[in-house]
Amino acid sequence: MNNEEKQKLLNAKTDLDTDMQLDVTEAEDLMDEFFKEFNVDRGNFNINTYYPDEPFSWNPFKKFPVAMVPDFTIGMLIESAKAGEWLYD
Protein backbone atom coordinates (compact mmCIF):
# COMPACT_ATOMS: atom_id res chain seq x y z
CA MET A 1 0.00 0.00 0.00
CA ASN A 2 1.49 3.36 -1.00
CA ASN A 3 1.38 6.53 1.07
CA GLU A 4 -1.48 8.03 -0.96
CA GLU A 5 -3.67 5.03 -0.21
CA LYS A 6 -2.87 5.35 3.49
CA GLN A 7 -3.90 8.99 3.66
CA LYS A 8 -7.38 10.27 3.15
CA LEU A 9 -7.16 13.27 0.86
CA LEU A 10 -9.17 16.25 1.98
CA ASN A 11 -10.61 18.85 -0.36
CA ALA A 12 -13.38 21.45 -0.45
CA LYS A 13 -16.01 18.77 -1.15
CA THR A 14 -15.01 16.62 1.83
CA ASP A 15 -18.03 16.28 4.14
CA LEU A 16 -17.28 16.45 7.85
CA ASP A 17 -20.06 13.98 8.66
CA THR A 18 -20.16 11.43 5.87
CA ASP A 19 -16.54 11.50 4.64
CA MET A 20 -14.62 12.29 7.82
CA GLN A 21 -17.18 10.56 10.05
CA LEU A 22 -16.93 13.15 12.82
CA ASP A 23 -19.51 12.62 15.53
CA VAL A 24 -21.53 15.55 16.85
CA THR A 25 -19.16 16.27 19.75
CA GLU A 26 -16.09 16.26 17.51
CA ALA A 27 -17.81 18.49 14.95
CA GLU A 28 -18.99 20.90 17.64
CA ASP A 29 -15.47 21.15 19.10
CA LEU A 30 -14.02 21.66 15.63
CA MET A 31 -16.48 24.45 14.86
CA ASP A 32 -15.86 26.20 18.20
CA GLU A 33 -12.13 26.22 17.38
CA PHE A 34 -12.82 27.27 13.78
CA PHE A 35 -14.88 30.31 14.81
CA LYS A 36 -12.28 31.35 17.38
CA GLU A 37 -9.11 30.64 15.37
CA PHE A 38 -10.29 32.32 12.16
CA ASN A 39 -12.33 35.06 13.85
CA VAL A 40 -15.52 34.01 12.07
CA ASP A 41 -18.90 35.27 13.31
CA ARG A 42 -21.09 32.26 14.21
CA GLY A 43 -24.20 33.96 12.86
CA ASN A 44 -27.02 31.38 12.63
CA PHE A 45 -24.72 28.35 12.91
CA ASN A 46 -26.41 25.50 14.76
CA ILE A 47 -24.74 22.09 14.95
CA ASN A 48 -28.19 20.45 15.03
CA THR A 49 -28.71 21.54 11.42
CA TYR A 50 -25.98 19.09 10.38
CA TYR A 51 -26.36 16.58 13.22
CA PRO A 52 -30.09 16.42 14.06
CA ASP A 53 -31.22 14.50 17.13
CA GLU A 54 -32.16 10.95 16.31
CA PRO A 55 -35.69 9.97 17.36
CA PHE A 56 -35.92 7.52 20.24
CA SER A 57 -38.41 4.74 20.80
CA TRP A 58 -38.56 1.94 23.32
CA ASN A 59 -39.90 -0.19 20.47
CA PRO A 60 -36.82 -1.63 18.69
CA PHE A 61 -38.96 -2.47 15.63
CA LYS A 62 -40.22 1.07 15.07
CA LYS A 63 -38.52 2.66 12.08
CA PHE A 64 -38.19 6.40 11.62
CA PRO A 65 -37.69 8.17 8.31
CA VAL A 66 -34.12 9.18 7.61
CA ALA A 67 -33.66 12.90 8.24
CA MET A 68 -32.49 14.94 5.26
CA VAL A 69 -29.31 16.65 6.40
CA PRO A 70 -27.53 19.35 4.36
CA ASP A 71 -23.91 19.00 3.31
CA PHE A 72 -21.35 20.10 5.87
CA THR A 73 -18.11 20.47 3.90
CA ILE A 74 -14.61 21.84 4.25
CA GLY A 75 -15.52 24.21 1.41
CA MET A 76 -18.21 25.75 3.60
CA LEU A 77 -15.59 26.47 6.25
CA ILE A 78 -13.23 27.97 3.66
CA GLU A 79 -15.87 30.28 2.20
CA SER A 80 -17.09 31.35 5.64
CA ALA A 81 -13.53 32.06 6.78
CA LYS A 82 -13.00 34.26 3.72
CA ALA A 83 -16.24 36.14 4.46
CA GLY A 84 -15.62 36.40 8.22
CA GLU A 85 -19.07 35.01 8.99
CA TRP A 86 -20.95 31.72 8.76
CA LEU A 87 -22.65 31.83 5.37
CA TYR A 88 -25.00 28.86 5.70
CA ASP A 89 -28.18 28.03 7.62
Image (cartoon, rainbow, N blue to C red):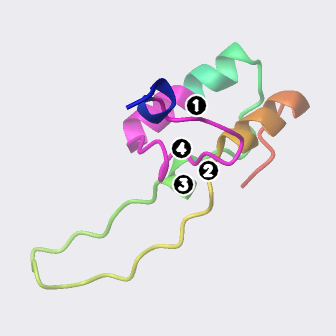
Badge 2 is on which residue? 72
The amino acid at mark 4 is: Leu
Residue found farthest to the front: 1
- Secondary structure at badge 1 equals helix
The N terminus: image quadrant = top left
Asked if labels 2 and 1 touch by Cβ distance under 8 angstroms, the answer is no
Disc 3 to disc 2, C-alpha distance: 7 Å
Location of residue 25 in the rendering, given as x and y in whole percent from the top left corner? 39, 36
Disc 3 to disc 4, C-alpha distance: 9 Å
Question: At 50% from the left edge and 35% from the top edge, which residue is drawn?
Answer: 8
- Secondary structure at badge 4 equals loop
Asked if labels 4 and 3 touch by Cβ distance under 8 angstroms, the answer is yes
Badge 3 is on which residue? 50
Packing grade of label 3 (10 A; few <14, some 14-19, many >=20) is some
Write down the region rendered in magenta: 7-30
Asked if labels 2 and 3 touch by Cβ distance under 8 angstroms, the answer is yes
The mark nearer the N terminus, 1 or 2, is 1
Badge 4 is on which residue? 16
Location of residue 15 in the rendering, given as x and y in whole percent from the top left corner? 57, 48
- Secondary structure at badge 3 equals helix
The mark nearer the N terminus, 1 or 3, is 1
The amino acid at mark 3 is: Tyr
State left or right for residue 33 relative to residue 60: right
Disc 1 to disc 2, C-alpha distance: 11 Å
Residue 21 on the magenta segment: yes
Residue found farthest to the right: 83
Badge 1 is on which residue? 31
Discs 3/4, front: 4
Discs 1/2, front: 2
The mark nearer the N terminus, 4 or 2, is 4
Question: At 38% from the left edge and 83% from the top edge, which residue is drawn?
Answer: 65
